[in-house]
Amino acid sequence: MSEVNIDTVKKYLLGLQDSICDALSEEDGKKKFIEDAWDREQGGGGRTRVLTNGAVFEQAGVNFSHVYGNKLPASATAHRPELEGREFQAMGVSLVIHPE
């Protein structure tokens, strides 16, 4: 199995977030997304983008996160104890959209 290129996946997901926000802003026609970049103290961060009180969308959130750490949380190893103590990375784009 080939090694996953984290930078390539991150670039793709950030572009996906941009594309979704652009399309939703264009569809709404009234409001644009406001961005809040954040950092996670234990490792990683992300971009939260929210559009509120638009013509089409009461509220829309399109978020990107990339978090990592040197030890999986207990909730992740509760049913898989063999993973305890391993490093992790997780990233993704999430959407929550409320039409007007």
Image: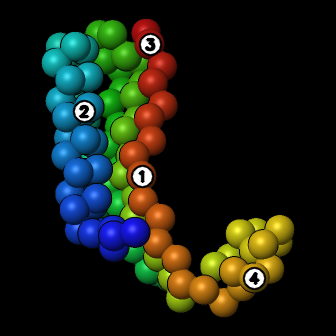
The location of residue 79, given as percent across then percent down, is 83, 68
Quarter of the image with the C terminus is top left
Q: Disc 4 marks which amino acid?
A: Glu
What residue did someone put label 3 on?
99
Q: Residue at x 45, y 42 (%)?
A: 94
Picture disc at residue 73? none
- Looking at the image, is mark 1 or mark 3 nearer the viewer? 1
Tag 1–tag 3 contact (CB < 8 Å): no
What residue did someone put label 1 on?
92
Taking depth in this image into account, of 60 and 43 the one nearest to the observer is 43
Comes first in the chain, label 2 or label 1: 2
What residue did someone put label 2 on?
21
Taking depth in this image into account, of 89 and 2 the one nearest to the observer is 2
Comes first in the chain, label 1 or label 3: 1
How many neighbours does mark 2 have within 10 angstroms: few (below 14), some (14-19), or many (20 or more)? many
How many neighbours does mark 4 have within 10 angstroms: few (below 14), some (14-19), or many (20 or more)? few
Q: Disc 3 marks which amino acid?
A: Pro
Question: Helix, strand or loop at disc 3?
Answer: strand
- Looking at the image, is mark 4 or mark 1 nearer the viewer? 4
